[in-house]
Image (spheres, helix red, strand yellow):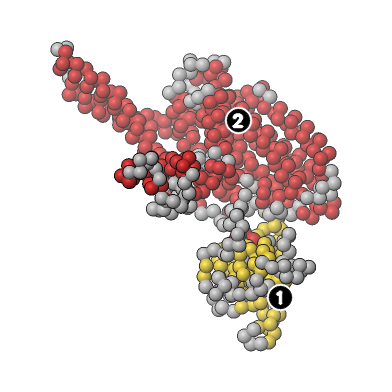
Protein backbone atom coordinates (compact mmCIF):
# COMPACT_ATOMS: atom_id res chain seq x y z
CA UNK A 1 0.00 0.00 0.00
CA UNK A 2 1.28 3.46 -0.96
CA UNK A 3 1.08 5.69 2.13
CA UNK A 4 -0.67 9.02 2.09
CA UNK A 5 1.98 11.64 2.86
CA UNK A 6 0.17 14.89 2.14
CA UNK A 7 -1.93 16.54 4.89
CA UNK A 8 -5.64 15.83 4.67
CA UNK A 9 -7.71 18.73 3.36
CA UNK A 10 -10.54 18.83 5.89
CA UNK A 11 -12.58 21.54 4.14
CA UNK A 12 -12.51 19.66 0.84
CA UNK A 13 -13.65 16.53 2.65
CA UNK A 14 -16.53 18.37 4.34
CA UNK A 15 -17.66 19.86 1.02
CA UNK A 16 -17.52 16.43 -0.64
CA UNK A 17 -19.52 14.90 2.23
CA UNK A 18 -22.13 17.64 2.10
CA UNK A 19 -22.47 17.23 -1.67
CA UNK A 20 -22.89 13.46 -1.59
CA UNK A 21 -25.18 13.36 1.46
CA UNK A 22 -27.25 16.28 0.22
CA UNK A 23 -27.66 14.73 -3.22
CA UNK A 24 -28.65 11.32 -1.88
CA UNK A 25 -31.00 12.87 0.69
CA UNK A 26 -32.71 14.89 -2.04
CA UNK A 27 -33.04 11.82 -4.28
CA UNK A 28 -34.56 9.69 -1.50
CA UNK A 29 -36.88 12.51 -0.46
CA UNK A 30 -38.20 12.92 -4.01
CA UNK A 31 -38.62 9.15 -4.44
CA UNK A 32 -40.52 8.93 -1.15
CA UNK A 33 -42.79 11.79 -2.19
CA UNK A 34 -43.48 10.13 -5.55
CA UNK A 35 -44.26 6.75 -3.98
CA UNK A 36 -46.63 8.21 -1.37
CA UNK A 37 -48.34 10.34 -3.99
CA UNK A 38 -48.78 7.36 -6.32
CA UNK A 39 -50.22 5.25 -3.50
CA UNK A 40 -52.86 7.93 -2.89
CA UNK A 41 -53.65 9.13 -6.41
CA UNK A 42 -53.55 5.95 -8.53
CA UNK A 43 -56.41 4.12 -6.70
CA UNK A 44 -58.55 7.27 -6.94
CA UNK A 45 -57.89 7.65 -10.69
CA UNK A 46 -58.55 3.94 -11.25
CA UNK A 47 -61.92 4.16 -9.56
CA UNK A 48 -62.76 7.23 -11.65
CA UNK A 49 -61.90 5.38 -14.90
CA UNK A 50 -63.98 2.40 -13.86
CA UNK A 51 -66.88 4.75 -13.17
CA UNK A 52 -66.59 6.26 -16.65
CA UNK A 53 -66.50 2.96 -18.54
CA UNK A 54 -68.62 0.65 -16.38
CA UNK A 55 -71.33 2.95 -15.13
CA UNK A 56 -70.32 2.70 -11.48
CA UNK A 57 -70.94 5.68 -9.20
CA UNK A 58 -68.30 8.39 -9.67
CA UNK A 59 -66.09 8.87 -6.56
CA UNK A 60 -67.50 11.51 -4.22
CA UNK A 61 -65.56 14.77 -3.84
CA UNK A 62 -63.15 13.63 -6.56
CA UNK A 63 -61.49 17.02 -6.95
CA UNK A 64 -60.87 17.51 -3.25
CA UNK A 65 -59.59 13.97 -2.81
CA UNK A 66 -57.30 14.36 -5.83
CA UNK A 67 -55.79 17.54 -4.42
CA UNK A 68 -55.37 15.87 -1.03
CA UNK A 69 -53.67 12.92 -2.70
CA UNK A 70 -51.27 15.17 -4.60
CA UNK A 71 -50.39 17.01 -1.39
CA UNK A 72 -50.16 13.86 0.70
CA UNK A 73 -46.73 12.97 -0.63
CA UNK A 74 -44.76 16.11 0.27
CA UNK A 75 -46.78 16.74 3.45
CA UNK A 76 -46.47 13.22 4.90
CA UNK A 77 -42.82 12.78 3.95
CA UNK A 78 -41.89 16.18 5.38
CA UNK A 79 -43.81 15.35 8.55
CA UNK A 80 -41.99 12.02 8.83
CA UNK A 81 -38.60 13.68 8.42
CA UNK A 82 -39.48 16.31 11.02
CA UNK A 83 -40.70 13.70 13.50
CA UNK A 84 -37.50 11.73 13.05
CA UNK A 85 -35.29 14.75 13.69
CA UNK A 86 -37.45 15.64 16.69
CA UNK A 87 -37.09 12.09 17.99
CA UNK A 88 -33.31 12.44 18.00
CA UNK A 89 -33.46 15.90 19.57
CA UNK A 90 -35.64 14.67 22.45
CA UNK A 91 -33.54 11.62 23.31
CA UNK A 92 -33.12 10.99 27.03
CA UNK A 93 -29.47 10.49 28.09
CA UNK A 94 -30.71 8.36 30.99
CA UNK A 95 -32.61 5.95 28.73
CA UNK A 96 -29.71 5.84 26.25
CA UNK A 97 -27.35 4.95 29.09
CA UNK A 98 -29.71 2.23 30.32
CA UNK A 99 -29.92 0.72 26.84
CA UNK A 100 -26.13 0.95 26.51
CA UNK A 101 -25.64 -0.96 29.77
CA UNK A 102 -28.22 -3.51 28.65
CA UNK A 103 -26.36 -3.99 25.35
CA UNK A 104 -23.06 -4.47 27.20
CA UNK A 105 -24.63 -7.09 29.50
CA UNK A 106 -26.13 -8.93 26.54
CA UNK A 107 -22.74 -8.93 24.80
CA UNK A 108 -21.05 -10.35 27.88
CA UNK A 109 -23.81 -12.92 28.26
CA UNK A 110 -23.20 -14.00 24.69
CA UNK A 111 -19.50 -14.41 25.54
CA UNK A 112 -18.25 -11.53 23.41
CA UNK A 113 -14.88 -11.60 25.18
CA UNK A 114 -14.29 -15.20 24.16
CA UNK A 115 -12.18 -13.69 21.38
CA UNK A 116 -9.62 -12.92 24.07
CA UNK A 117 -9.08 -16.65 24.50
CA UNK A 118 -8.17 -17.01 20.82
CA UNK A 119 -5.90 -13.99 21.11
CA UNK A 120 -4.18 -15.39 24.21
CA UNK A 121 -3.56 -18.77 22.53
CA UNK A 122 -2.06 -17.11 19.45
CA UNK A 123 0.19 -14.87 21.55
CA UNK A 124 1.34 -17.77 23.74
CA UNK A 125 2.54 -19.92 20.87
CA UNK A 126 3.59 -17.21 18.41
CA UNK A 127 6.98 -16.97 20.08
CA UNK A 128 7.82 -20.47 18.84
CA UNK A 129 7.66 -19.32 15.24
CA UNK A 130 9.32 -15.93 15.67
CA UNK A 131 12.18 -17.01 17.93
CA UNK A 132 15.50 -15.55 16.80
CA UNK A 133 14.01 -13.13 14.29
CA UNK A 134 15.38 -9.59 14.27
CA UNK A 135 12.89 -7.91 11.93
CA UNK A 136 10.47 -5.93 14.09
CA UNK A 137 8.18 -5.40 11.08
CA UNK A 138 7.07 -9.01 11.43
CA UNK A 139 6.27 -8.62 15.14
CA UNK A 140 4.29 -5.40 14.67
CA UNK A 141 2.35 -6.73 11.68
CA UNK A 142 1.55 -9.94 13.53
CA UNK A 143 0.16 -8.12 16.57
CA UNK A 144 -2.02 -5.83 14.46
CA UNK A 145 -3.43 -8.69 12.42
CA UNK A 146 -3.99 -11.06 15.31
CA UNK A 147 -6.03 -8.34 16.99
CA UNK A 148 -7.90 -6.81 14.05
CA UNK A 149 -9.04 -10.02 12.32
CA UNK A 150 -10.69 -11.77 15.33
CA UNK A 151 -12.15 -8.45 16.45
CA UNK A 152 -13.59 -7.89 12.99
CA UNK A 153 -15.41 -11.22 13.21
CA UNK A 154 -16.60 -10.36 16.73
CA UNK A 155 -18.06 -6.97 15.80
CA UNK A 156 -19.79 -8.49 12.77
CA UNK A 157 -21.49 -11.10 14.93
CA UNK A 158 -22.45 -8.61 17.63
CA UNK A 159 -23.72 -5.77 15.47
CA UNK A 160 -25.40 -7.79 12.72
CA UNK A 161 -27.03 -10.49 14.84
CA UNK A 162 -27.87 -8.67 18.08
CA UNK A 163 -31.04 -6.81 17.11
CA UNK A 164 -32.50 -9.54 14.83
CA UNK A 165 -31.97 -12.08 17.60
CA UNK A 166 -33.72 -9.82 20.12
CA UNK A 167 -36.65 -9.48 17.72
CA UNK A 168 -36.77 -13.24 17.20
CA UNK A 169 -36.60 -13.95 20.94
CA UNK A 170 -39.14 -11.15 21.59
CA UNK A 171 -36.83 -9.60 24.16
CA UNK A 172 -37.00 -6.30 22.27
CA UNK A 173 -40.75 -6.17 22.89
CA UNK A 174 -40.06 -5.50 26.58
CA UNK A 175 -38.08 -2.42 25.56
CA UNK A 176 -40.45 -0.97 22.95
CA UNK A 177 -43.43 -1.25 25.28
CA UNK A 178 -41.69 1.15 27.65
CA UNK A 179 -41.59 4.91 26.87
CA UNK A 180 -38.49 4.41 24.74
CA UNK A 181 -37.77 6.08 21.43
CA UNK A 182 -36.50 4.15 18.41
CA UNK A 183 -33.59 6.57 18.17
CA UNK A 184 -32.58 5.70 21.75
CA UNK A 185 -32.57 2.00 20.88
CA UNK A 186 -30.28 2.59 17.89
CA UNK A 187 -27.88 4.89 19.76
CA UNK A 188 -27.85 2.61 22.83
CA UNK A 189 -26.91 -0.36 20.64
CA UNK A 190 -24.11 1.55 18.97
CA UNK A 191 -22.67 2.83 22.23
CA UNK A 192 -22.91 -0.58 23.90
CA UNK A 193 -21.14 -2.48 21.13
CA UNK A 194 -18.58 0.32 20.82
CA UNK A 195 -17.79 0.14 24.53
CA UNK A 196 -17.29 -3.63 24.42
CA UNK A 197 -15.08 -3.35 21.33
CA UNK A 198 -13.01 -0.51 22.80
CA UNK A 199 -12.37 -2.44 26.02
CA UNK A 200 -11.34 -5.59 24.14
CA UNK A 201 -9.02 -3.73 21.75
CA UNK A 202 -7.41 -1.75 24.57
CA UNK A 203 -6.70 -4.89 26.58
CA UNK A 204 -5.27 -6.78 23.61
CA UNK A 205 -3.22 -3.75 22.50
CA UNK A 206 -1.53 -3.54 25.91
CA UNK A 207 -0.71 -7.25 25.84
CA UNK A 208 0.50 -6.91 22.25
CA UNK A 209 2.85 -4.05 23.13
CA UNK A 210 4.39 -6.03 26.00
CA UNK A 211 4.78 -9.02 23.68
CA UNK A 212 6.53 -6.94 20.98
CA UNK A 213 8.99 -5.42 23.43
CA UNK A 214 9.81 -8.75 25.08
CA UNK A 215 9.94 -10.71 21.85
CA UNK A 216 12.26 -8.30 20.02
CA UNK A 217 15.94 -9.20 20.56
CA UNK A 218 18.10 -6.70 22.41
CA UNK A 219 20.18 -5.85 19.34
CA UNK A 220 17.03 -5.18 17.28
CA UNK A 221 15.13 -2.97 19.72
CA UNK A 222 16.68 0.08 18.10
CA UNK A 223 14.25 -0.59 15.24
CA UNK A 224 11.31 0.20 17.54
CA UNK A 225 11.24 3.83 16.50
CA UNK A 226 8.68 6.29 15.22
CA UNK A 227 10.30 8.67 12.74
CA UNK A 228 8.56 12.00 12.28
CA UNK A 229 9.10 13.06 8.65
CA UNK A 230 8.48 16.33 6.83
CA UNK A 231 7.40 15.59 3.29
CA UNK A 232 7.59 17.77 0.21
CA UNK A 233 6.13 17.74 -3.29
CA UNK A 234 8.11 16.22 -6.15
CA UNK A 235 8.71 17.56 -9.65
CA UNK A 236 11.06 16.37 -12.40
CA UNK A 237 13.39 17.90 -14.98
CA UNK A 238 14.16 15.97 -18.15
CA UNK A 239 17.63 15.40 -19.62
CA UNK A 240 17.52 18.85 -21.23
CA UNK A 241 16.62 20.56 -17.95
CA UNK A 242 12.99 21.24 -18.87
CA UNK A 243 10.01 20.58 -16.62
CA UNK A 244 8.54 17.07 -16.93
CA UNK A 245 5.27 15.76 -15.49
CA UNK A 246 6.81 12.35 -14.78
CA UNK A 247 10.20 10.78 -14.53
CA UNK A 248 11.65 8.50 -17.15
CA UNK A 249 9.91 5.13 -17.55
CA UNK A 250 12.64 2.47 -17.61
CA UNK A 251 10.24 -0.40 -18.30
CA UNK A 252 9.04 -1.24 -14.81
CA UNK A 253 5.44 -2.49 -14.77
CA UNK A 254 4.83 -0.57 -11.56
CA UNK A 255 5.09 3.12 -12.42
CA UNK A 256 5.12 4.32 -8.80
CA UNK A 257 8.66 5.66 -9.19
CA UNK A 258 9.95 7.96 -11.90
CA UNK A 259 13.62 7.87 -12.93
CA UNK A 260 16.21 10.55 -13.67
CA UNK A 261 19.10 9.96 -16.03
CA UNK A 262 22.61 10.21 -14.70
CA UNK A 263 25.19 12.51 -16.24
CA UNK A 264 22.56 14.82 -17.75
CA UNK A 265 20.52 17.83 -16.61
CA UNK A 266 17.77 15.52 -15.42
CA UNK A 267 16.81 16.28 -11.83
CA UNK A 268 14.30 15.39 -9.15
CA UNK A 269 13.28 18.42 -7.06
CA UNK A 270 11.43 18.31 -3.75
CA UNK A 271 9.76 21.50 -2.55
CA UNK A 272 9.17 21.81 1.20
CA UNK A 273 6.82 24.39 2.68
CA UNK A 274 6.12 25.69 6.18
CA UNK A 275 9.25 24.16 7.72
CA UNK A 276 9.46 24.84 11.44
CA UNK A 277 13.22 25.11 12.01
CA UNK A 278 12.72 24.61 15.74
CA UNK A 279 11.84 20.98 15.01
CA UNK A 280 15.10 20.34 13.13
CA UNK A 281 17.35 20.31 16.24
CA UNK A 282 20.06 22.56 14.69
CA UNK A 283 20.75 20.17 11.83
CA UNK A 284 19.21 19.05 8.58
CA UNK A 285 18.69 15.28 8.40
CA UNK A 286 17.75 14.09 4.91
CA UNK A 287 16.59 10.52 4.50
CA UNK A 288 15.90 8.89 1.15
CA UNK A 289 15.14 5.48 -0.28
CA UNK A 290 15.90 5.47 -4.00
CA UNK A 291 15.95 2.71 -6.57
CA UNK A 292 18.91 2.23 -8.90
CA UNK A 293 18.51 1.08 -12.50
CA UNK A 294 21.73 0.11 -14.25
CA UNK A 295 21.77 0.37 -18.03
CA UNK A 296 25.29 -1.08 -18.08
CA UNK A 297 27.30 -2.99 -15.54
CA UNK A 298 29.82 -0.23 -14.78
CA UNK A 299 31.80 -0.79 -11.59
CA UNK A 300 29.72 -3.60 -10.12
CA UNK A 301 31.51 -3.28 -6.78
CA UNK A 302 30.27 0.26 -6.23
CA UNK A 303 26.80 1.70 -5.84
CA UNK A 304 25.61 4.72 -7.79
CA UNK A 305 26.60 8.23 -6.84
CA UNK A 306 24.12 10.99 -6.15
CA UNK A 307 24.24 14.56 -4.83
CA UNK A 308 21.83 16.81 -2.96
CA UNK A 309 21.65 20.53 -3.65
CA UNK A 310 19.77 22.76 -1.22
CA UNK A 311 18.04 25.68 -2.95
CA UNK A 312 16.68 28.83 -1.38
CA UNK A 313 13.46 29.44 -3.35
CA UNK A 314 13.53 33.19 -2.61
CA UNK A 315 17.13 34.14 -3.34
CA UNK A 316 18.03 31.21 -5.59
CA UNK A 317 21.18 30.38 -3.56
CA UNK A 318 22.41 26.83 -4.13
CA UNK A 319 24.25 24.84 -1.47
CA UNK A 320 25.85 21.60 -2.66
CA UNK A 321 25.99 18.73 -0.18
CA UNK A 322 28.94 16.32 -0.64
CA UNK A 323 28.36 13.41 -3.02
CA UNK A 324 27.22 10.15 -1.51
CA UNK A 325 26.74 6.54 -2.60
CA UNK A 326 23.16 5.38 -2.42
CA UNK A 327 22.16 2.30 -0.48
CA UNK A 328 20.04 0.35 -2.94
CA UNK A 329 18.54 -1.91 -0.27
CA UNK A 330 18.15 0.49 2.64
CA UNK A 331 17.78 4.06 3.76
CA UNK A 332 20.23 6.81 2.88
CA UNK A 333 20.66 9.23 5.78
CA UNK A 334 22.59 12.45 5.24
CA UNK A 335 23.12 14.82 8.18
CA UNK A 336 24.05 18.42 7.38
CA UNK A 337 25.01 20.62 10.39
CA UNK A 338 23.51 24.06 10.72
CA UNK A 339 26.92 25.72 10.38
CA UNK A 340 27.90 24.20 7.05
CA UNK A 341 30.96 24.72 4.86
CA UNK A 342 30.68 23.92 1.14
CA UNK A 343 32.38 24.75 -2.16
CA UNK A 344 30.51 27.51 -3.97
CA UNK A 345 30.71 26.86 -7.72
CA UNK A 346 29.86 30.49 -8.52
CA UNK A 347 32.57 32.15 -6.42
CA UNK A 348 35.03 29.23 -6.78
CA UNK A 349 35.77 29.20 -3.07
CA UNK A 350 34.59 27.64 0.17
CA UNK A 351 31.73 29.28 2.09
CA UNK A 352 30.46 28.77 5.61
CA UNK A 353 26.78 29.55 6.05
CA UNK A 354 24.00 29.23 8.56
CA UNK A 355 21.98 26.56 6.79
CA UNK A 356 18.62 27.70 8.17
CA UNK A 357 19.22 31.28 6.96
CA UNK A 358 20.88 30.45 3.64
CA UNK A 359 18.67 27.57 2.42
CA UNK A 360 15.30 28.21 4.09
CA UNK A 361 13.25 31.30 3.26
CA UNK A 362 9.97 31.85 5.12
CA UNK A 363 9.85 28.14 5.93
CA UNK A 364 10.32 27.09 2.29
CA UNK A 365 13.19 25.13 0.76
CA UNK A 366 13.95 22.97 -2.27
CA UNK A 367 16.17 19.90 -2.46
CA UNK A 368 17.52 18.96 -5.88
CA UNK A 369 18.72 15.39 -6.49
CA UNK A 370 20.92 14.36 -9.40
CA UNK A 371 22.54 11.08 -10.43
CA UNK A 372 26.24 11.42 -11.22
CA UNK A 373 26.80 8.14 -13.09
CA UNK A 374 26.54 8.53 -16.86
CA UNK A 375 24.09 6.12 -18.47
CA UNK A 376 22.60 5.00 -15.14
CA UNK A 377 19.17 5.86 -13.73
CA UNK A 378 17.93 6.74 -10.26
CA UNK A 379 14.27 6.16 -9.38
CA UNK A 380 12.24 7.96 -6.76
CA UNK A 381 8.70 8.71 -5.66
CA UNK A 382 7.38 11.60 -3.60
CA UNK A 383 7.55 9.64 -0.35
CA UNK A 384 11.13 8.49 -0.98
CA UNK A 385 12.77 11.64 0.39
CA UNK A 386 11.90 13.59 3.51
CA UNK A 387 13.38 15.66 6.30
CA UNK A 388 13.67 13.96 9.66
CA UNK A 389 12.83 15.54 12.97
CA UNK A 390 13.43 13.97 16.41
CA UNK A 391 11.69 10.61 16.77
CA UNK A 392 8.41 10.29 18.64
CA UNK A 393 8.06 7.69 21.43
CA UNK A 394 7.27 4.29 19.94
CA UNK A 395 4.56 3.55 22.51
CA UNK A 396 2.74 6.75 21.57
CA UNK A 397 2.84 5.89 17.87
CA UNK A 398 1.67 2.38 18.76
CA UNK A 399 -1.38 3.79 20.59
CA UNK A 400 -2.23 6.02 17.64
CA UNK A 401 -1.85 3.04 15.32
CA UNK A 402 -4.46 1.07 17.23
CA UNK A 403 -6.69 4.14 17.29
CA UNK A 404 -6.96 3.67 13.51
CA UNK A 405 -7.86 0.00 13.99
CA UNK A 406 -10.48 0.90 16.60
CA UNK A 407 -12.03 3.50 14.26
CA UNK A 408 -12.32 0.84 11.57
CA UNK A 409 -14.11 -1.54 13.97
CA UNK A 410 -16.46 1.23 15.11
CA UNK A 411 -17.38 1.94 11.49
CA UNK A 412 -18.10 -1.76 10.95
CA UNK A 413 -20.35 -1.68 14.05
CA UNK A 414 -22.17 1.32 12.60
CA UNK A 415 -22.81 -0.51 9.33
CA UNK A 416 -23.79 -3.72 11.11
CA UNK A 417 -26.33 -2.08 13.43
CA UNK A 418 -27.80 -0.10 10.52
CA UNK A 419 -28.19 -3.21 8.38
CA UNK A 420 -29.70 -5.20 11.26
CA UNK A 421 -32.47 -2.61 11.63
CA UNK A 422 -34.09 -3.65 8.35
CA UNK A 423 -32.76 -7.16 7.59
CA UNK A 424 -32.11 -10.40 9.40
CA UNK A 425 -28.74 -11.48 10.76
CA UNK A 426 -27.32 -13.40 7.77
CA UNK A 427 -28.34 -10.72 5.26
CA UNK A 428 -27.02 -7.95 7.49
CA UNK A 429 -23.69 -9.78 7.80
CA UNK A 430 -23.36 -10.19 4.03
CA UNK A 431 -24.29 -6.55 3.40
CA UNK A 432 -21.76 -5.32 5.96
CA UNK A 433 -19.04 -7.56 4.53
CA UNK A 434 -19.71 -6.11 1.08
CA UNK A 435 -19.27 -2.58 2.44
CA UNK A 436 -16.04 -3.60 4.16
CA UNK A 437 -14.46 -5.62 1.36
CA UNK A 438 -15.43 -3.94 -1.91
CA UNK A 439 -13.04 -1.00 -1.54
CA UNK A 440 -10.24 -3.30 -0.34
CA UNK A 441 -10.20 -6.13 -2.91
CA UNK A 442 -7.56 -5.48 -5.56
CA UNK A 443 -9.77 -5.91 -8.70
CA UNK A 444 -12.28 -3.40 -7.36
CA UNK A 445 -9.50 -1.04 -6.29
CA UNK A 446 -8.11 -0.96 -9.83
CA UNK A 447 -11.55 -0.22 -11.28
CA UNK A 448 -12.27 2.52 -8.77
CA UNK A 449 -8.84 4.10 -9.31
CA UNK A 450 -9.45 4.24 -13.06
CA UNK A 451 -12.82 5.89 -12.45
CA UNK A 452 -11.45 8.37 -9.91
CA UNK A 453 -8.51 9.29 -12.16
CA UNK A 454 -10.72 9.72 -15.23
CA UNK A 455 -10.72 13.30 -16.47
CA UNK A 456 -13.96 15.00 -17.63
CA UNK A 457 -14.76 13.92 -21.19
CA UNK A 458 -12.06 11.24 -21.18
CA UNK A 459 -13.01 7.66 -22.04
CA UNK A 460 -11.64 4.68 -20.17
CA UNK A 461 -9.24 2.63 -22.26
CA UNK A 462 -11.03 -0.55 -23.31
CA UNK A 463 -14.45 0.91 -22.51
CA UNK A 464 -16.94 0.02 -19.82
CA UNK A 465 -17.92 -3.46 -18.57
CA UNK A 466 -20.04 -4.44 -21.59
CA UNK A 467 -17.57 -3.12 -24.16
CA UNK A 468 -14.70 -4.81 -22.33
CA UNK A 469 -16.62 -8.10 -22.32
CA UNK A 470 -17.24 -7.83 -26.06
CA UNK A 471 -13.56 -7.06 -26.66
CA UNK A 472 -12.50 -10.11 -24.65
CA UNK A 473 -14.96 -12.36 -26.49
CA UNK A 474 -13.94 -11.06 -29.93
CA UNK A 475 -10.21 -10.85 -29.06
CA UNK A 476 -10.26 -7.16 -29.91
CA UNK A 477 -7.33 -4.97 -28.84
CA UNK A 478 -8.33 -2.00 -26.61
CA UNK A 479 -6.66 0.37 -29.09
CA UNK A 480 -8.81 -0.77 -32.03
CA UNK A 481 -12.17 1.04 -32.59
CA UNK A 482 -14.92 -1.36 -31.58
CA UNK A 483 -17.63 -0.19 -33.99
CA UNK A 484 -15.67 -1.64 -36.92
CA UNK A 485 -15.81 -5.18 -35.53
CA UNK A 486 -19.23 -5.66 -33.96
CA UNK A 487 -21.75 -6.73 -36.59
CA UNK A 488 -21.34 -10.13 -38.26
CA UNK A 489 -23.11 -8.68 -41.34
CA UNK A 490 -20.42 -6.06 -41.85
CA UNK A 491 -23.00 -3.26 -41.95
CA UNK A 492 -21.48 0.00 -40.76
CA UNK A 493 -24.86 1.40 -39.70
CA UNK A 494 -25.61 -1.67 -37.58
CA UNK A 495 -22.12 -1.54 -36.09
CA UNK A 496 -22.52 2.12 -35.21
CA UNK A 497 -25.98 1.56 -33.68
CA UNK A 498 -24.76 -1.32 -31.50
CA UNK A 499 -21.72 0.70 -30.55
CA UNK A 500 -23.90 3.61 -29.44
CA UNK A 501 -26.19 1.35 -27.40
CA UNK A 502 -23.21 -0.30 -25.69
CA UNK A 503 -21.68 3.11 -24.92
CA UNK A 504 -24.93 4.37 -23.39
CA UNK A 505 -25.35 1.30 -21.17
CA UNK A 506 -21.70 1.45 -20.14
CA UNK A 507 -22.13 5.13 -19.32
CA UNK A 508 -24.96 4.32 -16.93
CA UNK A 509 -22.89 1.56 -15.30
CA UNK A 510 -19.85 3.83 -14.96
CA UNK A 511 -21.96 6.54 -13.32
CA UNK A 512 -23.30 3.92 -10.91
CA UNK A 513 -19.75 2.87 -10.07
CA UNK A 514 -18.77 6.50 -9.62
CA UNK A 515 -21.64 6.86 -7.16
CA UNK A 516 -20.44 3.70 -5.38
CA UNK A 517 -16.95 5.19 -5.13
CA UNK A 518 -18.39 8.22 -3.36
CA UNK A 519 -20.68 6.18 -1.09
CA UNK A 520 -18.61 3.14 -0.14
CA UNK A 521 -15.95 3.84 2.51
CA UNK A 522 -12.27 3.47 1.68
CA UNK A 523 -11.08 1.20 4.50
CA UNK A 524 -7.45 1.61 3.44
CA UNK A 525 -7.57 4.92 5.37
CA UNK A 526 -7.45 2.88 8.59
CA UNK A 527 -4.28 0.95 7.72
CA UNK A 528 -1.78 2.36 10.20
CA UNK A 529 0.10 -0.91 10.54
CA UNK A 530 2.34 -0.31 7.51
CA UNK A 531 3.58 3.07 8.71
CA UNK A 532 4.31 1.82 12.22
CA UNK A 533 5.98 -1.38 11.02
CA UNK A 534 8.29 0.66 8.79
CA UNK A 535 9.34 2.84 11.69
CA UNK A 536 7.21 5.94 11.03
CA UNK A 537 5.02 7.89 13.38
CA UNK A 538 1.26 7.72 12.85
CA UNK A 539 0.71 11.41 12.26
CA UNK A 540 -2.53 13.21 12.87
CA UNK A 541 -2.82 15.27 9.69
CA UNK A 542 -1.99 12.51 7.18
CA UNK A 543 -3.31 9.35 8.87
CA UNK A 544 -5.59 9.81 11.87
CA UNK A 545 -7.56 12.83 10.65
CA UNK A 546 -8.74 11.05 7.46
CA UNK A 547 -9.72 8.00 9.55
CA UNK A 548 -11.63 10.08 12.11
CA UNK A 549 -13.34 12.09 9.36
CA UNK A 550 -14.32 8.95 7.47
CA UNK A 551 -15.91 7.43 10.58
CA UNK A 552 -17.78 10.59 11.52
CA UNK A 553 -19.02 11.04 7.96
CA UNK A 554 -21.18 7.91 8.16
CA UNK A 555 -22.71 8.50 11.60
CA UNK A 556 -25.54 10.85 10.59
CA UNK A 557 -26.63 8.94 7.43
CA UNK A 558 -26.47 5.58 9.19
CA UNK A 559 -28.37 6.81 12.24
CA UNK A 560 -31.16 8.18 10.05
CA UNK A 561 -31.37 4.99 7.95
CA UNK A 562 -31.36 2.81 11.08
CA UNK A 563 -34.03 4.92 12.79
CA UNK A 564 -36.51 4.99 9.92
CA UNK A 565 -35.89 1.31 9.17
CA UNK A 566 -36.55 0.27 12.76
CA UNK A 567 -39.54 2.60 13.03
CA UNK A 568 -41.24 1.07 9.99
CA UNK A 569 -40.19 -2.52 10.73
CA UNK A 570 -42.78 -5.07 11.77
CA UNK A 571 -41.36 -6.40 15.01
CA UNK A 572 -43.76 -9.33 15.05
CA UNK A 573 -42.14 -10.68 11.90
CA UNK A 574 -39.38 -13.05 12.95
Q: Residue at x 69, y 80 (%)?
A: 342
Q: How many marks?
A: 2
Q: Which residue is mark 1?
A: 322
Q: Is residue 513 among the parts visible in the rendering?
A: no
Image-based side of 390 in relation to 500, left or right = right
* Pair 2/1: label in front: 1
Q: Is residue 113 among the parts visible in the rendering?
A: yes
Picture layout, residue 542 above or below residue 386: above
Q: Position of residue 362 (x, y in %)?
A: 56, 71
Mark 1 neighbour density, 10 Å: few (under 14) some (14–19) many (20 or more): few
Q: Residue at x 81, y 40 (%)?
A: 129
Q: Residue at x 47, y 46 (%)?
A: 476
Separation of residues labelled 2 and 1 (CA atoms): 56 Å
Q: Position of residue 407 (x, y in %)?
A: 60, 41
Labels 2 & 1 near each other (Cβ < 8 A): no
Q: Which residue is mark 2?
A: 156
**Which element type, helix, strand or loop, lies under badge 1?**
loop
Instruction: Depth check: give the residue in front, 79 or 47.
Output: 47
Q: Residue at x 66, y 51 (%)?
A: 531
Q: Position of residue 468 (x, y in %)?
A: 46, 43
Mark 2 neighbour density, 10 Å: few (under 14) some (14–19) many (20 or more): many
Instruction: Depth check: give the residue in front, 376 or 479.
Output: 479
Name the outermost residue toward the front. 489
Image-based side of 485 in relation to 50, left or right = right
Counting residues from the start of the chain, the first of labels 2 and 1 encountered is 2
Amino acid sequence: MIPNIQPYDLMTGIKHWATVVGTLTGVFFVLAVILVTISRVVPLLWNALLALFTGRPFPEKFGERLVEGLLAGPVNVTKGVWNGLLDFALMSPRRVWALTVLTIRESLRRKAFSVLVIFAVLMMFAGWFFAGGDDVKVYISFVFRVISWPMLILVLLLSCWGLPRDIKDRSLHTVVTKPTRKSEIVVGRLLGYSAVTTAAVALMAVVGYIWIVRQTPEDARSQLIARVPIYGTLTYLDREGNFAEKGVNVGDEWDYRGFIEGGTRSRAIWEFKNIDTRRLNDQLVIESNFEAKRMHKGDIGKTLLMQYTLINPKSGDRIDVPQTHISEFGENITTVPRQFTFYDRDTKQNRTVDLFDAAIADGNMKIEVRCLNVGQFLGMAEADLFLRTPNAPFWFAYVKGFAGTLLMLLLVILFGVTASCFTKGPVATIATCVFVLVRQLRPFQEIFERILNQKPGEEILGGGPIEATIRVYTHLNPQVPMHDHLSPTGSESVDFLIFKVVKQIDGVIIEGLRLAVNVLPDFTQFYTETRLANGFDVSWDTTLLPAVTLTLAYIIPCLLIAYYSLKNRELEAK
